[in-house]
Image: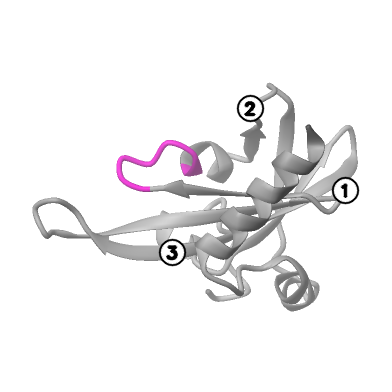
């Protein structure tokens, strides 16, 4: 991704490698990293889906898959994320000199299955 572009104002293809801060009540509550995931559908047509990794300020993580027709990403690109509890977060895309550092810290560096396994262990630990 070109670091000068704002993924919220560009096409969905600009989201690969994007990172954003999730802000609630003026405080950064987490970070969102997005990576594209090309695949073939049932008719063997090439399509692109996306993995969204949410890293929360408390250290917990969630990973979501979005594929055509996109359900999660349009709202995120519009600047709003609503979690499963109904909490709303402002999405602030990081395009300045902090981007590389935030990607190193909160980006997607492993397979989606790795993050799914971590998230499932967190869930069990919370019960």
Decide: marks 2, 1 in contact (CB < 8 A)? no
Q: Which residues are magenta?
A: 67-73
Distance from label 2 to label 1 (Cα)? 17 Å
Question: Can residue 10 be seen at all in this image of the molecule?
Answer: no
| Picture layout, residue 111 above or below residue 124 | below
| Residue that mark 1 sits on | 58
| Residue that mark 3 sits on | 36
**Relative to residue 118, is residue 114 drawn left or right?**
left
Q: Nearer the viewer, residue 124 or 82?
A: 124
> Which structural element holds mark 2?
loop
| Residue that mark 2 sits on | 84
Q: Nearer the viewer, residue 83 or 76?
A: 83
The spot of residue 70 in percent (x, y) is 38, 41
- How dense is the environment of label 3, judged by Cα within 10 Å: few (below 14), some, or many (20 and up)? many
Q: Residue at x 73, y 76 (%)?
A: 104
Among numbered discs 3 and 2, the one appearing first in the sequence: 3
Q: Quadrant of the C terminus?
A: top right
Q: Which mark is residue 70?
A: none
Q: Residue at x 54, y 45 (%)?
A: 77
């Amino acid at each position: 991704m070109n670091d000068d572009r704002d993924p919220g104002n560009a096409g969905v293809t600009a989201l690969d490698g994007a990172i954003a801060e999730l802000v609630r009540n003026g405080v950064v509550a987490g970070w969102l990293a997005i990576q594209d995931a090309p695949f073939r559908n049932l008719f063997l047509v090439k399509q692109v889906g996306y993995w969204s990794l949410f890293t929360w300020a408390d250290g917990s993580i969630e990973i979501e898959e979005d594929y055509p027709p996109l359900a999660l990403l349009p709202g995120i690109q519009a600047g709003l994320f609503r979690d499963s509890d109904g909490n709303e977060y402002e999405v602030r895309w990081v395009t300045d000199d902090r981007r590389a550092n935030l990607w190193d810290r909160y980006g997607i560096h492993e397979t989606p299955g790795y993050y799914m396994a971590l998230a499932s262990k967190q869930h069990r630990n919370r019960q």
